[in-house]
Image: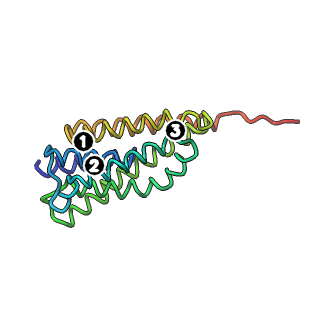
Amino acid sequence: MEYIIPVLIGIGLAAACGFRVFVPLLLLSVFSHTGYMTPSEDFVWVGTVPALICFSVATLLEVGAYYIPWLDNLFDSIATPLAAIAGIFTSLAVISDLDPMLKWSTAVILGGGSASLFQILTVKARAVSSTITAGFGNFIVSTVELFISIVVSLLSIIAPVIAITTLIGLIIILIYYIRKHIKQRRNKPTVIRQ
C-alpha cells in the first residue's frame, strides 16, 4: 500500500498536467515548500524558493496564453509534448522507494500517458468549442480546464483515490461529448445548391 499512494498521486498530478502544464508543478512546489509533502530524493529542489518562483511565472504565462484567441491554439501544439514531459516529471517527483526501472516505467507509461491522454482530450474539446463558437467560447473552455487542473492537482495531493475516481469520470464525460459532437456533424444534412 505504501507504493500505491505515491503512484496515484503521480498519476493524478500527471493527468492535471494535461489540462494545464504548470499548475500541477506549481502546486507540487508549494506543497513541497510548505512541508506538506516530501518529493523523492532527486526532486527535493522542487520545494525551493527559486523553483517556486519559476513555476509561478510559468503558470501565469501559460494561463494568460490560453485567454488570447489565436495564441491558445498555437500553445496547444507546444503544450502537447510539454504535458507528457511534465507528467513524467511530476510522477518521478512523487514516486520514491521503488526500483529505478519500475519507477521510470511507471512515470513514463502512467504519468506521461495520462498527461498525454488529457491533453489530447482538451485539444479536441477546444476544437469542438472553436467549431461551435468560432473561437469565442474558448475562454470558457480555458477557464474550465484551469479549474479542473487546480482541483485535480489538489485532490491528487490531498485525496489521491478521489482524484483518480474523478479523472475516470472526466474521461467518460469528455469522450461522450466529443463523440456526440462528431456524430452530430456527420448527421448534418448537406445542402446542394442549384
Dot 1 falls on a residue whose secondary structure is helix
Q: Label 1 crowding class (10 Å Cα cut-off): few <14, some 14-19, many 20+?
A: many
**Disc with the residue nearer the chain's start (3 vs 1):** 1
Horizontal relation, residue 115 to residue 124: left or right: left
Residue at image position (45%, 44%) is 121
Q: Position of residue 114 (x, y in %)?
A: 35, 50
State the image coordinates of residue 80 (x, y, percent, origin top left).
45, 54
Residue 13: assigned label: none
Residue at position x 51%, y 54% in the image: 77
> Which residue, given by chain and number where applicable, does mark 2 sit on?
11
Which image quadrant is residue 110 in? bottom left
**Label 1, on which residue?**
156
Marks 3 and 2, how far apart in space? 25 Å
| Of 118 and 141, the residue lying toward us | 141
Name which quarter of the figure residue 113 lies in.
bottom left
Kind of residue sitting beneath label 2: Ile
Q: Residues within 10 Å of mark 2 (few under 14, many from 20)?
A: many
Circle 3 or circle 2, nearest the eye: 2
Name the side, left or right, on which 159 lies relative to 141. Answer: left
